[in-house]
Image: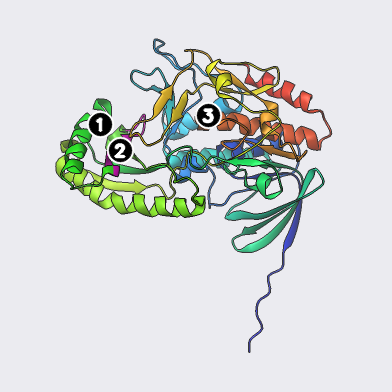
Amino acid sequence: MSNPVRIGSTTIACDVLVIGGGAAGVAAATAAGRAGVKVVLLERYGFLGGLATTAQVGTICGLYLRDTTGAEATPVGGGFPQEFASRLQPAADTRPVRVVDTGLWVLPYPPPAFAHVADAVVSDAKNVTVILHATVAEAQAEGSRLNQVRALAWNEPLLFRPNAVVDCTGEATAAALAGANAENGGADQAPALVFVLENADPGLAQRGLLEVRRELHWAVENGTLPALCERLSLVPGTGAHGRVAFKLTLLPAEPGRALWQQVTDWERESRALLEPLRQFLVEKVASCRDARLDSVAPQLGVRSGRRMLGRARLADEDVMGTRKFPSGIARGSWPMERWTKSPRPEMTYFAERDYYEIPVDCLRAVELDNVWVAGRCFSATTGAMTSARVIGTALATGWAAGTAAAFQVMGRPVDDAVTAIRQSMEM
């Protein structure tokens, strides 16, 4: 009988442990690294970017003010989100575009370019150790401090002993595992699968999907395609060089169903529809007659999940009233965008050329003094998060959480971190 290979756990100490390498995690790790503390960044995939890359979102929303008359995009603020955008634009050969009729400005990008810029800014920050293919399985607190996190990195067990943690998982995973209260928002929004057709008529994106929706409706009516196929939409800013990105939005989660089970079914259901849908577009839509399937996002774009209950909570009325806070550490400019059972999103707009602020205590766990949360799992009501979940805002909350965690580790007051963050937000 051969001796089994025994795998021991490696212990790693750090000042700030950032969990999740999406937009918020990249911003948090960069902020803490630039502050001079020792940072470890964990990411479950083999590259950075989170849903911006794995779900091929394709546009950064929330960087600019809504403006139906201006000829150019106006940034909602300065700081890291605009720095990231300024590096992404030449890397991706892109610029801001306005969505027709809404006044919303977005920044289109190819996912590989986003991943490249994310990797570059983290590397430039110094002091940041990136660990890819890492999944957190356990987090333990002693009193009011999270002091131990266990993860698997390429199937090797690692034990982390951080002084502070920034949870950018999108599901408040580490905070919840350590005992922080959270609410399950998994059924709040419908997810979507993105796929790209190449060699399509570039004019399709300019004309919108009117011709496609007409054909889809007829196909659903006569039973050629399932009704879910009518939930097809275009990714804003798509169409360059004949590469058109589509979003197939699914139905929201069934109430009371385990989210892990629901996500598995979503992934399988959406991918099973891709071939008949592609074939239909090529055969029935003139603009797609010569098109070929170029890529399919490796992960479903999940728009909502678990949210931490923080020391403050961003509310619907804060968003709609464009409320400003003395402790505001991020600015939100995107409207409430609800994807539910309707084939199109329900958009609720606040005043043009205005923004709301997110107070720092929305990023702080009630029960855990050294845990910060950023991205789409900070403390907010369901409606408020339909606005604040977008990439531009995630970059801002990530930067704030990373800065606050670094200041905390250095023994500096949170108020000093807020002051530094607010100064960076000014143009």
Q: Residue 56: x and y, percent? A: 42, 41
Query: Dot 3, how many residues are within 10 Å of its Cα: few (below 14), some (14-19), or many (20+)?
Result: many
Q: Secondary structure at mark 2?
A: strand
Q: CA distance from mark 3 to mark 1?
A: 26 Å
Q: CA distance from mark 3 to mark 2?
A: 24 Å
Q: How is the image coloured?
A: rainbow
Q: Residue 349: x and y, percent? A: 45, 18
Image height of 413 relative to 409, above or below: above
Q: CA distance from mark 1 to mark 2?
A: 9 Å
The residue under label 3 is which amino acid type? Gly
Residue labelled with disc 2: 232
Query: Dot 1, how many residues are within 10 Å of its Cα: few (below 14), some (14-19), or many (20+)?
Result: some
Tell me where residue 236 sits by quadrant: top left
The residue under label 2 is which amino acid type? Leu
Question: What stretch of residues is rendered in magenta?
Answer: 228-238
Q: Secondary structure at mark 1?
A: loop
**Upstream in the sequence, badge 3 or badge 2?**
2
Say which residue appears at 36% left-offset and 48% top-offset.
296
Tell me where residue 55 sits by quadrant: top left
Q: Residue placed farthest to the right in the image?
A: 411
Q: Secondary structure at mark 3?
A: helix
**Upstream in the sequence, badge 1 or badge 2?**
1
Q: Residue 224: x and y, percent? A: 18, 48
Whether residue 77 appears in this view of the structure is: no
38 or 44: which is nearer to us? 44
427 or 86: which is nearer to us? 427
Residue 392: assigned label = 3
97 or 341: which is nearer to us? 341
Residue 209: assigned label = 1
**Upstream in the sequence, badge 3 or badge 1?**
1
